[in-house]
Amino acid sequence: MATAYIETTVPSYYVARTSDSLLQAAKQAATRRWWDGGFSGFELFTSLETLDEAGKGDGKMAADRLQLLRGIPLLPLPDEGLELARYLVTSGIVPQKAASDAIHIAVASAHRMDYLVTWNFKHIANPFIQDRLRIAITRAGFELPVMCSPEELLQNEDDEDD
């Protein structure tokens, strides 16, 4: 079974109030469809970093996010993963203000996840930094997971129906 690491944007989109923005509402709907449809058959994992982020903000929404994440196995951040996250920040691949994003990438890479599922295209699934991430992570002895959104995974399922 393929493995997928989910970071904070996935449960955030799932529990968010439906947006008036058509684009945001479509992302929310895709997230709910992916989640409720069995995660494309993946075995899900997350981390304490995700739980920490999910627990912030509006109390009701935070509680809903944490409830959604309940029962998903937590992956620890091994020492070499922490070193990798630090390098991603100090090298400028991931900005300091997004250090938690570097942790998500490092945890998923250190645990050799097949996928990192995210809606964060600014600092995680950004096609303009993918090559730099891949090189840094390969040099550290790991492999960069496929980074994609729940919507992209649904598109694959839709193709199977044809």
Image: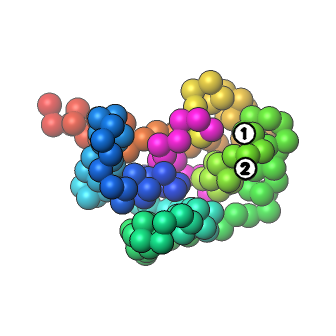
**Quick check: marks 1 and 2 in contact, CB under 8 Å?**
yes
Amino acid at the residue labelled 1? Val
Q: Residues within 10 Å of mark 1 (few under 14, many from 20)?
A: many
Tell me: residue 148, above or below residue 100.
above
Residue linked to disc 2:
99
Q: Quadrant of residue 138?
A: top right
Relative horizontal placement of residue 86, taking residue 77 as reference (left or right): right
Tell me the residue at 37%/56% (across/down): 16
Q: Which quadrant of the figure contains the N terminus?
A: bottom left
Main SS of the magenta segment?
loop
Relative horizontal placement of residue 64, taking residue 140 as reference (left or right): left
Is residue 114 visible in this depiction of the protein? no
Tell me the residue at 44%/56% (across/down): 12
Q: Which numbered dot is residue 94?
A: 1
Q: Which numbered dot is residue 112?
A: none
Whether the magenta-drawn stretch holds residue 129 is answered as: no
- Secondary structure at badge 1 equals loop
Amino acid at the residue labelled 2? Ala
Total marks drawn? 2
* Residue 125, image x, y percentages: 55, 36
Residue situated in front as seen by the camera: 52 or 137: 52
* Residue 82, image x, y percentages: 77, 57
- Secondary structure at badge 2 equals helix
Tell me the residue at 25%/40% (across/down): 157
Real-space Cα separation, disc 1 to disc 2, in angstroms? 7 Å
Q: Over which residues does the magenta segment extend?
A: 109-123
Residue situated in front as seen by the camera: 53 or 109: 53
Q: Which quadrant of the figure contains the C terminus?
A: top left
Tell me: residue 92, above or below residue 59.
above
Tell me: residue 70, above or below residue 139.
below
Residue situated in front as seen by the camera: 84 or 123: 123
Whether the magenta-drawn stretch holds residue 116 is answered as: yes
